[in-house]
Image: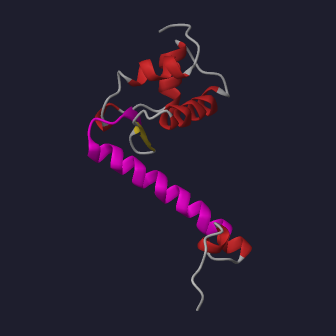
Amino acid sequence: MPNEELTRDTLLAALRRHIGRRHGITATALCREVLGGQPNGGAERHLRELVVELRKAGHHVCAHPRDGYFLADSAEELEETCAFLRSRSMSGLEQIAAMKRVSIPDLMGQLRMPS
């Protein structure tokens, strides 16, 4: 795919060559593969934004610092990515709750049962 533009379609086409954890690829290498050359400074950030869009569209795009980016080859790989994303989300919520000195349910505006 030399001289391609980094879009949802070109990214998904490239990811279809990286199915399963064992075929994971770093963000830099994935950008290079799609663009056909060395990515510019904003390419990896754009790639991460496109990954979010693909996930929101229902594509099973997995990623982990250890494995890189890939499409899930199994329900287990998908669940591991979901657990990783959940963990990152909870960590962020815990940090916000601690800084604001409130509980996570209070932070999220959840209703509490009266004591």
Q: Is residue 72 magenta?
A: yes
User: Is residue 94 found left or right of 30 in the rendered image?
Assistant: right
Q: Seen from this angle, which residue lies furthest front?
A: 114
Does 32 appear above or below 4? Answer: below
Say how many tags the image has.
0
Residue 73 position, x and y percent, is 28, 35
Kindly give the residue lying farthest to the top in the view shown.
2
> What's the colour scheme?
secondary structure
Q: Residue at x 51, y 7 (%)?
A: 2
Q: Position of residue 80 (x, y in %)?
A: 35, 50
Q: Main secondary structure of the magenta part?
A: helix
The x, y position of residue 90, in whole percent, is 53, 62
Q: Is residue 75 left or right of residue 43?
A: left
Query: What residue do we see at 62% from left, 76% from top?
Result: 103
Task: Judge whether residue 53 is colored magenta.
Answer: no
Q: Is residue 79 left or right of residue 105?
A: left
Residue 29 vs 36, above or below: the answer is below
Quadrant location, the C terminus: bottom right
Quadrant of residue 106 in the image? bottom right
Q: Bounds of the magenta span?
A: 69-96
Horizontal placement of 33 versus 67: left or right?
right
Q: Quadrant of residue 97?
A: bottom right
Q: Residue at x 55, y 57 (%)?
A: 89
